[in-house]
Amino acid sequence: MPDFTLTIGGQNVAGAARPIPVIDPSTGQAFTDSPAATVAQLDQAVDAAAQAFATWQHSSHAERSAALERVAGAIEQHAAELADLVVREQGKPLALAQMEVGGAVAWTRAAAALEIPVEVIEQREGKRIELHRKPLGVVGSITPWNWPLMIAVWHIMPALRAGNAVVIKPSPFTPLSTLRLVQIMAAVLPAGLVNSVVGEAEVGQAMAEHPGIAKLVFTGSTRTGQDIMRRAAGNLKRLTLELGGNDAAIVLPGTDTAAIAEGLFATAFLNMGQTCAALKRLYVHESQVDAVCEQLAAIAARQVLGGGLEPGVTFGPVQNAPQLTRVEALVEDARAQGARIVCGGQRLDRPGYFYAPTIVAGLSNGARLVDEEQFGPVLPVIAYRTVDEAVALANASSMGLGGSVWGDVQAATALAPRLECGTVWVNGHAEVLPHCPFGGSKMSGVGVEFGLDGLLEYTQPQLLNING
């Protein structure tokens, strides 16, 4: 186990606050402690980032791209170590953790390859008007516990590519892979360009209010995003908020459900259902609900539950005890309302936070399991009579991150734009790509990530109006 420290100004720094126990969700027991920062140490990290930014903002695009390529190579060199940390603190199976590390490398290289254009708005004799993009300054990042390494990369790399410096605070449930990532990055980047702090809500709130942080990027719950937005008003902090998602999917009548069952299951139970853009509500025509439930239950029965480092495991635990309690409460509420628990529906009788993959039928909108994002290994399958009814039910949510339509490609593509969400997939779900903008509508967020649109959110437009 490496020596976990904060990184401030390019130096390994011990936390000055009380250490935070890090729980292995496969055992429910702490396996190490994470250092924790005080608000005073957050101030030091912001100051260090500001000093690094003073120089980095003037770096060329080629220098920034080369720096990110160095980072990608360093992550690759430490891939096995990082994957092991992700498994230990987050709980996912090793193969999925290895995919997360591989994705982090690919996303870093994608950010390195992005170009920031200068837009010529007007060009004529004696007049040229150009729109340039300038970095903002210090970017704060607050990341969740479900994809701790990948989402850290999603926040950090475009910020650096655009010419900013970064202070990142990972979730106290899963701090280790991010702390190690920043240590690895600090070895190949200018001192202070990326800094890490760990803490509970007090540190996150201080980041939202901090006058030295020009932009904050947050991935997490809608409630916390609302709190951040209120606190960020002091210096009109720029925000990118990727918040809750209660994604709906519609299976069109007459679809060969046996052909799509594996895709439905994989995208609903990705990372044990602990993915913002996972399929969370499945609307199926009433004539096919029973068949879909049976098909999904058969796939659930094949899953091998266990610790992520155990051989052959395909399905890990819920990441933390509070989330497991929430999943249990939602299923019990559904059971009390007369829902049919097709499979699963209980916690496993073993140490750790294991909950069997669960399919629930017999509910509709108005039930907590349908209306609230479960963020766990449970999927409600909801019957509808007409396609128009399905669309209305799918859209009857305050959230709008993603959605999907499954069935005949032409019919599904025609229906897809009627869904009220930031991304609509046809015959798929939960696929996010480094070259495609991704963000939510309604209460699912503000701004977008990825691609050129996501990169430009880390910049400030400056108009250059030239006469003569």
Image (tube, helix red, strand yellow):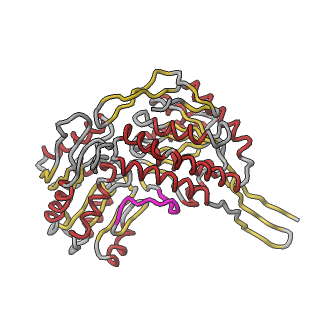
Q: Quadrant of residue 266?
A: bottom left
Q: Is residue 282 visible?
A: yes
Q: Which residues are magenta?
A: 428-438
Residue 458 magenta-highlighted: no
Query: Is residue 364 positioned above or below 201 on the image?
Result: below
Residue 43 at x, y percent in the picture: 61, 28
Answer left or right for 396 relative to 133. Answer: left
Query: Is residue 216 positioned above or below 96 on the image?
Result: above
Q: Quadrant of residue 293?
A: bottom left
Q: Is residue 236 visible?
A: no
The residue positioned 31% from the left and 36% from the top of the image is 25
Identify the image quadrant of the C terminus: bottom right
Q: Residue furthest right?
A: 468
The residue positioned 47% from the left and 37% from the top of the image is 170
Residue 381 at x, y percent in the picture: 21, 58
Residue 263 at x, y percent in the picture: 29, 63
Please tell me which residue lies in front, 70 or 300.
70
Magenta part, dominant SS: loop
Residue 255 at x, y percent in the picture: 23, 73
The residue positioned 79% from the left and 60% from the top of the image is 465
Query: Is residue 178 positioned above or below 134 on the image?
Result: above
Identify the image quadrant of the N terminus: top left
Query: Is residue 133 positioned above or below 32 on the image?
Result: below
Q: Residue furthest bottom?
A: 410
Q: How many marks can you see?
A: 0
